[in-house]
């Protein structure tokens, strides 16, 4: 998958009009769509002072942003789209403070943008159904996200770290999220819920995976899936998922 550069993003979405046009394409298939008043396909034109399109024949209004995360938001669409670009092109995610710094909005506004986008991405993952199936292959692995606590000397201190568990379908989708620990009774229900029967499952040989009697799968292979690989898969697929769902 070719990298989507910031220069390409700026060229594609230079202003709010271009962003609204993209939303119109996703919601209605383009600027020519069915008019409820004329009861036929008509050409719609963007309005200057509203996030709306007007029918060329009768003037009926269509609001493409209605029912989306942009609905009733006074924040410019270019800022929303730029936040989406940052969140989908950065491996480690983007904090609300970074959105505030780069766009000039308030922290409250930046936090809401991040919150809405994360909810959108989570719902897009949930709509995808189970991973794998007969003849397909998934990989499972967990990693610690966070840093060592300050002023605690040398050694491992996990109080400031979160365990993230992920399931990746080879050449397909991914499911990931925080878990309280990496033991059989925590991970087995997650795998059963998200992986179809008959799927070949690979892991790094962690004791929790060996202990879990996975349904109709082949033996687990010690392939591993490091933290960078785990989030690399997510980064490659989030851009298309967010833009399609918005």
Image: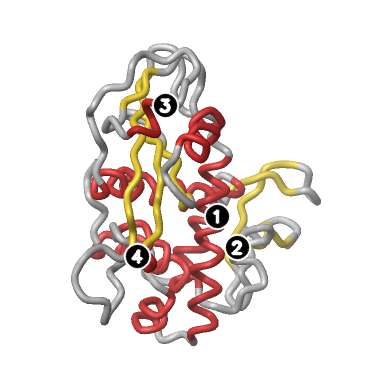
CA separation, marks 2 and 4? 17 Å
Mark 4 and mark 3 lie on one chain; the one further toward the N terminus is 4
Q: Which mark is residue 159?
A: none
Q: Is residue 28 left or right of residue 138?
A: right
Residue 162 on image: x %, y %: 40, 59
Q: Quadrant of the C terminus?
A: bottom right
The residue tagged with tag 3: helix, strand or loop? Answer: helix
How packed mark 4 is, by other alpha carbons closer than 10 Å (few <14, some 14-19, many 20 or more), is: some
Question: CB of mark 2 within 8 Å of CB of mark 1?
Answer: yes
Question: CB of mark 2 within 8 Å of CB of mark 4?
Answer: no
Q: Nearer the viewer, mark 4 or mark 3?
A: 3
Give the camera-side residue of 10 and 149: 149
Which corner quadrant of the image does residue 96 belong to? bottom left
CA separation, marks 2 and 3? 42 Å
CA separation, marks 2 and 1? 8 Å
The residue tagged with tag 2: helix, strand or loop? Answer: loop
> Residue sitting at 48 percent across and 77 percent down?
110
The residue tagged with tag 1: helix, strand or loop? Answer: helix
Q: Which mark is residue 120?
A: 1
The residue pinned by badge 4 equals 86
Mark 4 and mark 1 lie on one chain; the one further toward the N terminus is 4
Residue 192 on image: x %, y %: 53, 28
The residue pinned by badge 3 equals 211
CA separation, marks 4 and 1? 15 Å
Mark 2 and mark 3 lie on one chain; the one further toward the N terminus is 2
CA separation, marks 1 and 3? 34 Å
The residue tagged with tag 4: helix, strand or loop? Answer: helix
């Amino acid at each position: 998958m070719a990298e989507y550069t910031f220069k390409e993003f700026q060229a594609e979405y230079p202003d709010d009009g271009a962003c609204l046009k993209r939303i119109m394409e996703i919601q209605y298939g383009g600027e020519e769509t069915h008019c409820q008043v004329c009861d036929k396909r008509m050409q719609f034109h963007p309005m200057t002072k509203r996030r709306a399109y007007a029918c060329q024949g009768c003037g009926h209004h269509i609001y493409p942003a209605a029912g989306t995360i942009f609905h009733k938001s006074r924040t410019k669409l270019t800022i929303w789209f730029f936040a989406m670009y940052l969140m989908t092109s950065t491996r480690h995610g983007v904090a609300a403070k970074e959105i505030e710094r780069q766009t000039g909005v308030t922290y409250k506004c930046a936090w809401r943008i991040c919150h809405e986008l994360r909810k959108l991405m989570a719902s897009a993952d949930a709509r995808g159904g189970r991973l794998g199936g007969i003849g397909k292959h998934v990989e499972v692995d967990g990693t610690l996200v966070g840093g060592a606590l300050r002023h605690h000397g040398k050694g491992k201190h996990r109080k400031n770290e979160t365990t993230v568990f992920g399931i990746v379908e080879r050449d397909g989708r991914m499911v990931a999220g925080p878990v309280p620990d990496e033991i059989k009774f925590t991970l087995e229900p997650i795998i059963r819920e998200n992986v179809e029967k008959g799927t070949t499952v690979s892991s790094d040989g962690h004791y929790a995976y060996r202990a879990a009697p996975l349904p109709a799968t082949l033996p687990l292979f010690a392939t591993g899936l490091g933290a960078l690989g785990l989030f690399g898969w997510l980064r490659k697929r989030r851009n298309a998922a967010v833009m399609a769902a918005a």
